[in-house]
Amino acid sequence: MAETRYSKDHEYIRIEGDVGTVGISDYAQSQLGDVVFVELPAVGKALDKGGEAAVVESVKAASEVYAPVSGEVVEVNAELEGAPGTVNEDPAGKGWFLKLRIKDAAELDALMSEAEYQDYVKSL
Amino acid sequence: MAVEAADATNEASGAAVPLKTPLHARHVALGARMVPFAGYDMPVQYPTGILTEHNWTREKAGLFDVSHMGQCFLVGPDHETTAKALEALIPADIVNLAPGRQRYSQLLNEEGGILDDLMVTRSIDPDEDGALYVVVNAACKDADYAHIEARLPANVKLVKAEHRGLIALQGPGAEAALAKIAPEAAEMGFMSSRTMKVAGIKANVSRSGYTGEDGYEISAAANKIGEIWDTLLLDADVKPIGLGARDSLRLEAGLCLYGHDIDATTSPIEAGLNWSIQKRRREEGGFPGAARIQRELAEGTSRIRVGLKPEGRAPAREGTEIATPEGEVIGTVTSGGFGPTLNGPCAMGYVARAHAAPGTQLHLIVRGKPLPAVVTPMPFVPSHYKR
């Protein structure tokens, strides 16, 4: 079964084998407000843990989305170009940003589990 | 994820303990997200969000709390004396402002730079002749009052109206909604002002606003403004709107935001506000920076504020460099974002005059990459002022 882990910057990564699907949490989308534009990286780009992976823009502000772990981009969600609001409507599902081939599975250990992340959000 | 470009509403937060408008508790009860703005704790959005609020205002009627803005009266012995005292500080013709009319103008420094922009209203009531009602920006009000007071003649006084609240009702449904509780409001023309009972409460009502839509601003005693707010919200066509949508609405309408599109380094002519300087003042001068402004009116300026429509969907935010397609930097974006009614990005900024003609192709440098954009006449969305 796929496991989802979270960064303190509110990105999630859903792990299926050596590929992880990256997006932003429901909390993050609620804080951002209405998403109007998403800039995604090129397929094949190598991302470093904590480096800029994508940009998400709401009506009012631009925010960077960071790579929760290092890896190579293998797919991006092209649907977001025409329907950026999907990030608000279904952040954990259809509103995903990109898939990456995880370089070092050990980096996942530093991320939070679902329960840990929910506690973290409550503490904010 | 981290917020990279802070929104305009987070600036100038100033005071350590934010001030509250008379409607603060109502915003909290409505579930608003409160942010510091110009020293006040203000609603940036309500639970439905900025897009929904923006669209509601364009289609129905949006209700805004703008009680943080500075309301004051200049009081002198007669209209001409008070008007001349104010004319020494601003370039608008106030002497010839008719009773019950209002004008947009700018407080200028000696170099003709804009210290603040403001609305000036002459009361329709002959008993109040000699008094001018002035509304200034929240972030500037203390400095404005000090600047004005220091320059008034002995027989004209500045009286702060800190005991008053101010709300704006904006949108195509504004007239019908307000007329239900203040029938006189329906008869008013654009940029006019009257004193009337609104839901039984004495209020100053003007037909003006900051959204590009028809609408009103309603000023009443701080301890009564909440009753007017509550009564208006009983109308199914009226919803509360936060500062976020206020900003996207005014951007689409091509209206300047002080501290961003205009400031002490920009003149009204560079900002394209020539229309706000009436003929008599252009000819006679007699306001701060008149020499520069008269020269700029005659000869033009080296840079000018223009509208910019980026191709594609990516917004260009404040501070974005504006370049020619060849890569020469010729200006900076002063306001930019996503226009919900336009359904695309829009921006304004200053460019060298040679590149200011509508249709000129330019580049906006967004995250290091040139984004094609075209100089576009403003407003980006047609205005619907009452004529």
Image (cartoon, coloured by chain):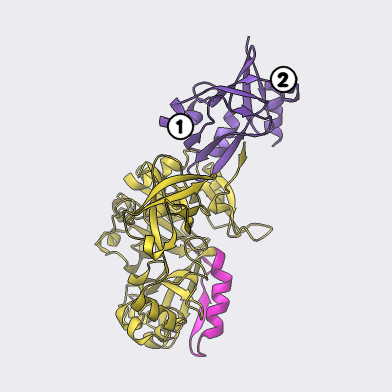
- Circle 2 residue: A104
Q: Which residues are magenta?
A: B139-165
Q: Residue furthest top?
A: A1
The structure residue drawn at horizontal position 52% and vertical position 71%, both measured from the top left corner, is: B264
- Name the amino acid, label 1: Gly
**Left or right: A100, with B358 as reference point:** right
Query: According to the rendering, which colour does chain A have?
Result: purple
* Residue B233 against residue B75 in the figure, above or below: above
Residue B160 located within the stretch drawn in magenta: yes
Quarter residue B367 falls in: top right
| Subunit that carries the residue with mark 1 | A
- Quarter of the image with the N terminus of chain B is top right
Label 2 CA crowd tier, 10 Å (few <14, some 14–19, many 20+): few
Relative to the observer, which residue lies in front, B319 or B230?
A: B319
Q: Secondary structure at mark 2?
A: loop
* Residue A27 against residue A71 in the figure, above or below: below
Residue A120 % position (x, y): 71, 30
Indicate the chain coloured yellow by its letter: B
Query: In the rendered image, is residue B322 in sight?
Result: yes
Disc 2 with disc 1 on a shared chain: yes
- Circle 1 residue: A85
- Name the amino acid, label 2: Asp
**Left or right: B231, with A104 as reference point:** left
Q: Residue furthest front?
A: B326
Query: In the rendered image, is residue B232 in sight?
Result: no
